């Protein structure tokens, strides 16, 4: 990790009428760092992820991102074409439901190849070869390359979504409950795969999860949210092993008691 942040949130807030989705959140993420955002349902963690990834427009505050040329830009100032290019190249977004992150009527290889074509790849043989390589990385057999994701299990669809997002080697990946809804044994396999790929590629990642075990396994640093606010932050092991805030203590103790 370098000393210069890759992404900075400065005073982010989001209101839905009178309801507060997120209030005055400031944080930073450095290259190669994995940040977990944890909290119960309704805590504001998904709203925060939407703001950081520009899927939601803030009611107040700003998000800054250090581009590949070294210039730090406010994301709200980017034009539509610049933002699309950023999402296709520098960013990935792994969603809880793989159906939301995949083209379900397009083959597995096509799902991976589409992202390559979006960044300028044109040679069919090279695209297919790269897609096959990434299917192998996420433990999908080569003979499934022409199968539709509709024929895949939930775990396979999630692994395919990961391949689709990482094939362009982004610098930052957003993950929204990436193991949610999967069987425990499938979760464990997927988490090990995510941890390996993030480490191998040197990715920065922001992971939203309600599962503290996921946060401990994957993240370097943790943000705890409640009622739209960040109430505690620190190194993941420190927060989980010695939580300061009563709410965090309750979260940790509820896991231990389960």
Image (cartoon, grey):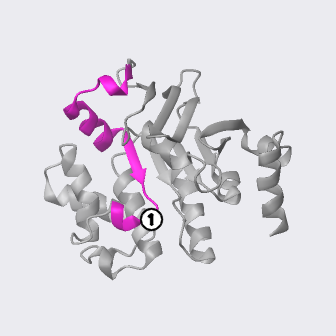
Q: Which residue is mark 1?
A: 138
| Outermost residue to the bottom | 151
Q: Nearer the viewer, residue 191 or 224?
A: 224
Could you tell me residue 90's position as x and y percent?
A: 36, 38
Horizontal side of 177 relative to 235 (left or right) equals left
| Helix, strand or loop for disc 1 | loop
| Outermost residue to the front | 18
Q: Is residue 57 above or below residue 127?
A: above
Crowdedness of circle 1 by 10 Å Cα count: few (<14), some, many (20+)?
some
Residue 29 showing in the rendered view = no
Q: Quadrant of residue 80?
A: top left
> In percent of the image, x 56 and y 47: which residue is there?
45
| Outermost residue to the top | 71
Could you tell me residue 58's position as x and y percent?
A: 42, 32
> In percent of the image, x 40 and y 50: which residue is there?
93
> In percent of the image, x 43 and y 40: which residue is there?
17
Q: Quadrant of residue 119?
A: top left
Could you tell me residue 173's position as x and y percent?
A: 45, 45
> In percent of the image, x 64 and y 49: which residue is there?
38
Q: Is residue 20 above or below residue 100?
A: above
- Quarter holding the N terminus? top right
Check if residue 152 falls in the magenta segment: no
Q: Is residue 35 above or below residue 145?
A: above
Span of residues in magenta: 73-100
Check if residue 94 falls in the magenta segment: yes
- Quarter holding the C terminus? bottom right
Total tally of numbered discs in the picture: 1
Could you tell me residue 99's position as x and y percent?
A: 35, 67
Residue 226 showing in the rendered view = yes
């Amino acid at each position: 990790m370098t000393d210069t942040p890759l992404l900075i949130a400065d005073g982010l807030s989001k209101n839905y009428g009178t309801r507060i989705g997120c209030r005055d959140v400031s944080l930073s993420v450095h290259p190669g760092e994995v940040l977990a955002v944890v909290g119960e349902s309704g805590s504001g963690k998904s709203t925060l992820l939407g703001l950081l990834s520009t899927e939601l427009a803030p009611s107040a505050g700003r998000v800054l991102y250090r581009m590949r040329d070294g210039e730090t830009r406010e994301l709200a100032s980017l034009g539509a074409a610049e933002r699309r290019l950023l999402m296709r190249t520098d960013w990935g977004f792994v969603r809880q439901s793989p159906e939301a992150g995949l083209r379900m009527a397009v083959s597995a290889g096509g799902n991976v190849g589409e992202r390559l074509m979006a960044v300028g790849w044109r040679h069919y043989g090279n695209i297919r070869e790269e897609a096959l390589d990434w299917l192998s990385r996420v433990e999908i057999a080569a003979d499934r390359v022409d199968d539709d994701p509709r024929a895949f299990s939930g775990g396979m669809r999630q692994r395919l979504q990961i391949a689709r997002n990482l094939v362009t080697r982004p610098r930052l990946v957003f993950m929204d409950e990436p193991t949610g809804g999967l069987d425990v044994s499938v979760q464990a396999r997927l988490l090990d795969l995510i941890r390996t790929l993030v480490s191998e590629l040197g990715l920065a990642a922001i992971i939203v999860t309600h599962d503290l075990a996921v946060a401990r396994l994957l993240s370097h640093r943790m943000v705890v949210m409640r009622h739209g606010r960040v109430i505690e932050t620190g190194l993941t092991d420190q927060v989980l092993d010695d939580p300061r805030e009563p709410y965090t203590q309750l979260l940790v103790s509820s896991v231990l008691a389960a």
